[in-house]
Image: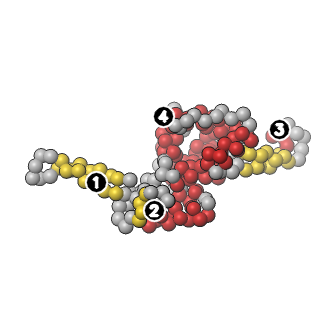
Amino acid sequence: QFLYFIGMSSSDDDGDIVVMRVCGGVGCTESFGLEFDEVTGESFCASCLGKLRKAERENDFRILLSADDRAAIDLIFRKFDTNSRGYWTFAEFNEYLEATDANRNEPVGPFESNEELSEYLVDEYDVRTVSVDVPGSVVGLPEGMIRIADVVTLEVLERIYGGYMYHGVNALRDDVDALEDAGEVNFDVLE
């Protein structure tokens, strides 16, 4: 990544263009002590490179998310978790996609089932959905617990956004902008 500065020189009226290499970490503007990473083809500061290596080693790209990122993801998750169940089925994921779809190069969905959604997330993001146990009354059964498979939890959504960060794409910023522009969510409450 590069930052471009245009400044005025005192000796002439032409602006000088100064190009600085900055860290390839999404949102990082560190410009000193950068180390080139062969895998990503980017240069990173020690802090971002450390997080990147740890995320790769642990196969958990949530490590790349800042506290502000996590707060925004939580707000997005709660927005589409209309019944406060702690998970999204394919229906809620479709609503999320519809609200943020303008940011996608190739439109996705709508999904017809949790299984179809799960297959897509594994193929596209290498992210696994989870199963949750819920009271049978949620689906009209008189008692007991049932397991609902292939749902998206907050952790799954964090893994998706963390994967974007790993690849140098700030999809979270794009989705936040789309949701704010549509009046879906007010992210000012996070500031």
Q: CA distance from mark 4 to mark 1?
A: 32 Å
Residue under pointer 1: 19
Q: Amino acid at mark 2?
A: Asp
Q: Residues within 10 Å of mark 2 (few under 14, many from 20)?
A: few
- Residue type at the position of mark 3: Val
- Disc 3 or disc 2, which is closer to the eye? 2
**Residue marked by disc 4:** 181
* Residue at the image point whose x is 64% and y is 51% from the top: 126
User: On the image, which quarter does residue 114 sit in?
Assistant: top right
Q: Is residue 68 above or below residue 113?
A: below
Labels 4 and 1: the sequence-earlier one: 1
Q: Give the residue displayed 73% in from the left and 50% down from the top.
A: 130
Q: Amino acid at mark 4?
A: Asp
Q: Secondary structure at mark 2?
A: strand
Q: Can the viewer see residue 103 in this picture?
A: yes
Number of residues whose C-alpha sits closer than 10 Å to that of mark 3, classed few (under 14), some (14–19) or many (20 or more): few
SS class, disc 3: helix
Sequence-earlier tag: 3 or 2: 2
Nearer mark to the viewer, of 4 and 1: 1
For label 3, the residue is: 139
Q: Is residue 103 left or right of residue 146?
A: left
Q: Which residue is mark 2?
A: 37
Determine whether, in the image, residue 168 is placed left or right of residue 60: left
Precedes in sequence: disc 2 or disc 1: 1
Which sits in the foreground, 38 or 81? 38
